[in-house]
């Protein structure tokens, strides 16, 4: 049986939680029933406070593009000058370093954005995709496997920056690691990134583009990312 | 010709999606940043990035969490790009007066001022829950926290808000640690 303190903590964390234990407690405890009314009145106020009805919608006139392309381009140009100056300074400071904590609007950022749109690809699994599916996905980018890259639980051909690219998930001890085979994206040096929960790297494959390898979540491990990168690069026949 | 029609349809669909979601995205970005101009920049950048990456969105039903993920990253990036001057909360409120002008009663106004004072790590899950209608599990997935950590933050957020707004807190419970990491 739930006690008052437990009930009140739960109702304060989620005033609309209606699980059976809580209902039972509320129905039998007058104080907690009164407390619930008090919390819910506060919740109505909170809801109204967060809505920001009028001003937030001022710019949402029907028929207007949801974003202003020209404004954005101007913004980018303005930022471009600042970025050029900042890059120069940054280049001096971090010359030689491969670590980029903030990848900015880069290939790494686009890879992370792509991954955020495919949550199903992050599932842990011990079931491999059929070999035929994997071959087909890779064949679309004119590559094929010549060795086993590990347990591949997901293989899909995804549109990325205007090209169909193989998107694979390799299961490791530290969790699923995603690989994107980017035959259209060349990279000069290996770049590691740590982008808000996504840990990964872009590895150049001289003459054949690059691969992006990343992991997310609390158990992320750059060593696992590096191991998978090395294994996949070695397993792919790039001149198929 | 066929490509052009396909391109137009794609653009129209994306535009409709953005138009439907934009008010909520702006609100979310505003409560995240507490700065209207920054919120608009972040939403703008988010939509451009989403437009470029729209092929990644396989299921339109997942659009909202996808956009929210991009907003959080764009906001964090803008924060890392700039060095913000520390502002007094009262100054922030005064600066955002037009955005907050919809308050038609003192209670709501007072609560908005309290929301401005709430630490980011408590305000964000609260906005996701109240404004976006997210469940505890969905907030946990979005913020990469455990369910227990989310519940602890939500509990603390409301408790602090109630105190800041001068509510009668005599019946409020004491905290019990739901999540050892919090």
Image (spheres, coloured by chain):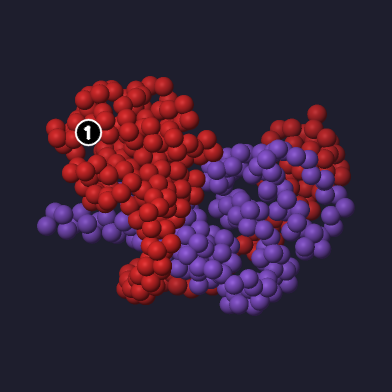
Chain colours: A red, B purple
Q: Position of residue A98 (x, y in %)?
A: 39, 50
Q: Crowdedness of circle 1 by 10 Å Cα count: few (<14), some, many (20+)?
A: many
The residue sitting at 28% across, 59% down in the picture is B11
- In this rendering, is residue A56 above or below B135? below
Q: Residue furthest left?
A: B1
Q: Secondary structure at mark 1?
A: helix
The residue sitting at 17% across, 58% down in the picture is B4
Q: Chain of mark 1?
A: A
Q: Position of residue B121 (x, y in %)?
A: 63, 53
**Position of residue A150 in the picture relative to residue A49 (left or right):** left
Looking at this view, is A188 or B71 the one in front? A188
Q: Quadrant of the C terminus of chain B?
A: top right
Looking at this view, is B8 or A179 the one in front? A179
Say how many tags the image has: 1
Name the residue carrying label 1: A138
The residue sitting at 59% across, 67% down in the picture is B34
Q: Position of residue B107 (x, y in %)?
A: 73, 68
- In this rendering, is residue B33 above or below B155? below
């Amino acid at each position: 049986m739930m006690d008052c303190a437990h009930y009140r903590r739960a109702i304060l964390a989620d005033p609309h939680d209606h699980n059976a234990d809580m209902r039972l407690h509320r129905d039998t405890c007058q104080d907690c029933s009164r407390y619930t009314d008090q919390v819910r009145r506060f919740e109505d106020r909170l809801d109204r406070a967060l809505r920001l009805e009028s001003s937030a919608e001022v710019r949402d006139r029907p028929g207007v593009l949801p974003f202003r392309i020209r404004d954005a381009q101007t913004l980018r140009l303005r930022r471009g000058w600042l970025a050029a100056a900042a890059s120069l300074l940054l280049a001096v400071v971090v010359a030689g370093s491969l670590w980029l904590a903030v990848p900015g609007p880069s290939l790494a950022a686009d890879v992370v954005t792509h991954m955020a749109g495919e949550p199903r690809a992050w599932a842990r699994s011990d079931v491999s995709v059929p070999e035929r599916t994997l071959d087909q996905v890779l064949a679309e980018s004119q590559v094929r496997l010549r060795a086993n890259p590990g347990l591949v639980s997901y293989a899909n051909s995804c549109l990325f920056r205007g090209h169909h690219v193989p998107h694979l998930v390799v299961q490791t001890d530290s969790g699923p690691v995603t690989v994107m085979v980017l035959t259209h994206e060349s990279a000069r040096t290996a770049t590691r990134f740590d982008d808000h929960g996504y840990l990964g790297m872009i590895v150049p494959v001289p003459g054949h583009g690059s691969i992006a390898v990343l992991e997310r979540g609390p158990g992320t491990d750059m060593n696992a990312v590096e191991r998978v990168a090395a294994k996949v690069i070695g397993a792919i026949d790039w001149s198929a | 010709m066929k490509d052009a029609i396909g391109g137009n349809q794609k653009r129209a669909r994306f535009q409709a999606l953005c138009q439907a979601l934009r008010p909520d995205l702006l609100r979310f970005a505003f409560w995240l940043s507490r700065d209207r101009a920054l919120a608009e920049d972040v939403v703008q950048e988010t939509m451009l990035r989403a437009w470029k990456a729209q092929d990644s969105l396989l299921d339109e039903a997942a659009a909202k969490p996808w956009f929210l993920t991009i907003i959080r990253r764009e906001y964090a990036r803008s924060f890392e790009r700039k060095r913000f001057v520390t502002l007094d909360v009262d100054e922030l409120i005064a600066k955002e007066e037009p955005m907050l002008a919809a308050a038609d009663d003192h209670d709501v106004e007072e609560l908005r001022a309290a929301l401005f004072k709430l630490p980011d790590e408590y305000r964000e899950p609260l906005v996701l829950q109240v404004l976006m209608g997210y469940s505890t599990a969905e907030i946990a997935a979005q913020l990469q926290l455990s369910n227990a950590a989310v519940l602890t933050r939500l509990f603390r957020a409301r408790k602090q808000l109630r105190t800041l707004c001068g509510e009668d807190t005599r019946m409020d419970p004491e905290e019990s640690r739901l999540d050892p990491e919090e």
